[in-house]
Image: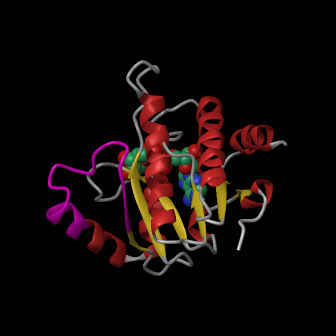
Amino acid sequence: MPAPPLSTRVQLVQGDITRQPVAAIVNAANSSLLGGGEVDGAIHRAGGPKILEECRFLRARKYPSGLPPGQAVATTGGNLPAAFVIQTAGPVWHGGNQHEAEELAQCYQSCLKIATAREFESVAFPGISTGIYGYPKPAAAALVVREVRQWLAAHAWPQTVTFVVFDEESQRLYERKLKP
Ligand code: AR6
């Protein structure tokens, strides 16, 4: 079956990513995989202890030095509506000359690669790195919309990607970038 048109495969929602009824949500985690604040904290609170248990296992067995920058790994969604959480650690913003854009693009690509390989029908992304890690929101929105569109144009899975924004500024930025 051919994939539906690109415009219908990308959605924008303002709200809490933990409530999204999708196959997988992405966590803006850190390389320790052991939890943190903001979206990471919200996901662990809403999803319950099963997520941290799996993160601890992955950390001990697969990533003893931490999840490398730009990589991603899937865990259970625990009690979340989403069956899976794709954990990734975005770059910390240091002014833009420390490969931050490259690393942010890699995070999105790694998450999408998992979603494609496992045929997740729908994936929701928060604005990775645009909170505590300080990545400027306008630059992130431009990069992210470009990366996701490119991926969807070349892959049938995931069928839909939802950008979940928390604040008005991000809502406006994504709206502008998603205009046909
Ligand atoms: N749903 C959707 N978006 C949210 C939510 C939510 N419930 N909560 C916050 N955001 P951040 P980072 C937005 O700081 O910058 C953690 O401690 C928020 O407005 O969560 O990648 C990790 O453990 C912002 O636009 O992630 C790391 O140590 C975006 O999500 C560090 O923070 C990302 O903000 C990662 O920092």
Q: Quadrant where the C terminus lies?
A: top right
Magenta stretch contains residue 160: no
Give above or below for 114 relative to 179. below
Q: Quadrant where the N terminus lies?
A: bottom right
Q: Seen from this angle, which residue lies furthest front?
A: 1
* Residue 165 visible here: no
- Disc tally is 0
In the image, taking residue 26 as reference, residue 141 lies left or right, namely: right
Residue 5: image x %, image y %?
78, 59
Give above or below for 144 relative to 82. above
Q: In the image shown, does 88 or 79 lie closer to the viewer?
A: 88
In the image, taking residue 69 as reference, residue 112 lies left or right, namely: right
Residue 49 appears in which quarter of the rendering? Answer: bottom left
Q: In the image, what residue occupies the spot 64% across and 38% down?
A: 141
Q: Seen from this angle, which residue lies furthest bottom?
A: 79
Q: Seen from this angle, which residue lies furthest right?
A: 180
Q: In the image, what residue occupies the spot 38% across and 22% down?
A: 98
Residue 99: image x %, image y %?
40, 26
* Residue 138 visible here: yes
Q: In the image shown, does 8 or 167 lie closer to the viewer?
A: 8
Magenta stretch in the rendered image: 56-74
Residue 125: image x %, image y %?
57, 55
Residue 94: image x %, image y %?
40, 23
Q: In the image, what residue occupies the spot 40% across and 34% down?
A: 92
Residue 34 appears in which quarter of the rendering? Answer: bottom left
Magenta stretch contains residue 58: yes
Q: In the image, what residue occupies the spot 57% across and 52% down?
A: 126
